[in-house]
Amino acid sequence: MEAKLYVGNLPFTTDDGDLQSLFAQAGTVTSAQVIKDRASGRSKGFGFVEMSSGDEAQSAINMFHGKDFNGRAMTVNLARPREERPAGGGFRGGGRRPGGGDRDRKRDY
């Protein structure tokens, strides 16, 4: 059974291939992905690695958690399931903004 790992505190220069080759030292990597910002395409400094078994995942945690990788101490642990978030975003509701004022009214001068 595959096990997914969260890998944090990565150098911003790390790419998917770097992550894959690093974790291959602990066992068979089925996927490795560095998470990138949608707008800029730059790394966000964390990623996910899927190992082919739970034993290999535990081996990777033991091998890499807290270890230095290009000047940064990595955080490696089992990934938590993704939480459901409500769709949409931005401001909800409508109407006037709280705080008073007659910003939305026409003035009779």
Image (cartoon, rainbow, N blue to C red):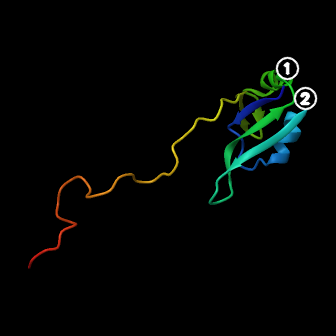
Q: Position of residue 6 (x, y in %)?
A: 71, 33
Residue lying at 68% horizontally and 58% vertically, measured from the top left: 41
C-alpha distance separating marks 2 and 1 = 9 Å
Name which quarter of the figure residue 108 lies in.
bottom left
Q: Position of residue 81 (x, y in %)?
A: 65, 31
> Does residue 38 appear left or right of residue 107 in this picture?
right
Element type where label 1 sits in the image = helix
Residue lying at 39% horizontally and 51% vertically, measured from the top left: 92
Amino acid of disc 1: Asp
Q: Residue 104: which numbered mark, if any?
A: none
Q: Quadrant of the C terminus?
A: bottom left
Viewer-nearest residue: 23 or 90 = 90
* Disc 2 to disc 1: CB gap under 8 Å: yes
Name which quarter of the figure residue 58 lies in.
top right
Lower position in the chain sequence, tag 2 or tag 1 = 2
Q: Position of residue 22 (x, y in %)?
A: 86, 37
Q: Which residue is mark 2?
A: 27
Graded by Cα atoms within 10 Å as few (under 14), some (14 to 19) or many (20 or more), the crowding at tag 1 reads some
Graded by Cα atoms within 10 Å as few (under 14), some (14 to 19) or many (20 or more), the crowding at tag 2 reads some
Name which quarter of the figure residue 57 lies in.
top right
Q: Quadrant of the N terminus?
A: top right
Q: Which residue is mark 1?
A: 55
